[in-house]
Image (tube, rainbow, N blue to C red):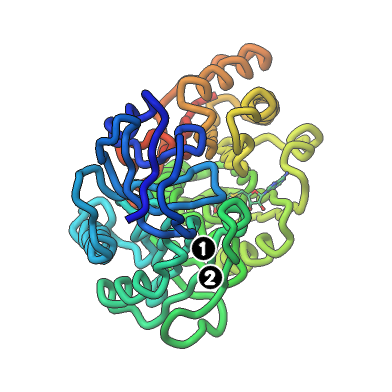
Amino acid sequence: MDEVILSKGRDRSVRRRHPWVLSGSVARVEGSPGPGDTVGVRSAEGERIGFGHYSPQSQIRVRLLGFGKEAPDEGLLVERVRSAVERRRSDPLLFGTDAIRLVNAEGDGLPGLVVDRYAECVVMRCSSAGMVARAALLAAALRDATGVRTGVRRDDSVAARREGFEARQEVLFGEAPEGPIAIDERGRRYLVDVLHGQKTGFYLDQRDARDLVERLARGRRVLDLFSYTGGFSVAAARGGASEISLVDSSAGALAVAARHLEPVAGEIAIRSVEADGFRFLRTDPGMYDLLVLDPPPLAKRRGDVAHASRAYKDLVLHALGRAAPGAFLLAFSCSHAIDPVLFRQIVFGASLDAGRSPQVLAALGPPSDHPVSIDHPEGAYLGGLLLRA
Ligand code: SAH
């Protein structure tokens, strides 16, 4: 087997079970592993400390799958897929929905792989050379473990460029979905376009926050900023909101949101605005009693943190200006680089500038089908606060 030898002292993170070997930690490579090949990882002293998938072009040079001396066989991946699916099946927190994240990359011991299930269709998203090289094996494992009719592969194109593979969009098994797939999330009905929607089609990571919005919405004027297809708006409508404004820069997403809200459009005043969310908040004269701020990742790298912090602060500052007394505000960040402590500081800075002193009611995060490995803090990307203005 080919081997990656680490520089002196760089074995520490592997011994602490961190699943990534970064290119800067690699002293040399023995043999000539190709993209996605399984390699052994050795300390500078020559001790075998783990195994993983090799990515010759990526900054994440090896994604580790095991930390022993024995090389795992390919059956390990199949077994991890099976147990990831099994854990969701027996998870009491995941009741009442036919749309679930089945595999959450490092969180399920499968770095480079995300799988979402929408009713009878699974969508597999590869972001590493190792998973791309095993796509057929993984598809078969998913089909066996779930028994669903259709499997679709929809790779992450940004990761594909970084890793040097060709992003695929293809049907893995079964018939290609003819249109959007209808899902039922605790009574909330959505249409998910697995072939053309963002990511795998829908933001399953906000399921519990949608439950919360449904409980908070009664009689309230709602602003769903960065609404995508109106996940939160549908929740607010079910919860008895009096009016709902959706804002997103994607006309396509707003068109789907309009379909989602059609059944209630006669009873609730709904306004859909195609605009830049930041500009909208600065110019909109509306007042709201329930505001959801769910922007796209503003900091993709550590280097973006200062800029992203200013952008978030700006957002929260102007949102507070549009919040009626007693309004609920759900503010989210989906950048790992903005950790919960920093996010709270940003919200604090915005409240000082706004001359408001909101109460923090709860910390928000993704549901249990998006587990984070304790070994891999980078896996925690989505966080938020529930505030009362
Ligand atoms: N709240 C959504 C998910 C939001 S994802 C849900 O629960 O389903 C972020 C959204 O922000 C995407 O729909 C994207 O189209 C939109 N977006 C990105 N940049 C934007 C901008 N500058 N102004 C408004 N919307 C933007």
Residue behind mark 1: 200
Above or below 179: residue 78: above
Above or below 138: residue 233: above
Q: Of label 2 and label 1, which has the lower sequence position?
A: 2
Residue at the location (47% across, 30% down)? 385
Would you identify the image quadrant in which residue 179 lies?
Answer: bottom right
- Between 192 and 263, the residue placed more toward the observer is 192
Q: Position of residue 92 (x, y in %)?
A: 21, 53
Tags 2 and 1 touching, CB below 8 Å = yes
- Horizontally, residue 361 falls left or right of residue 221, namely left
Residue at the location (28% across, 62% down)? 77
Q: What element carries label 2?
A: loop
Quadrant in which the C terminus appears: top right
Which amino acid type is marked by label 1? Thr
- Horizontally, residue 106 falls left or right of residue 84, namely right
Answer yes or no: disc 2 within 8 Å of ligand 1.
no
On residue 287, which mark appears? none
Residue behind mark 2: 194
Above or below 56: residue 365: above
- Between 374 and 119, the residue placed more toward the observer is 374
Residue at the location (66% across, 55% down)? 270
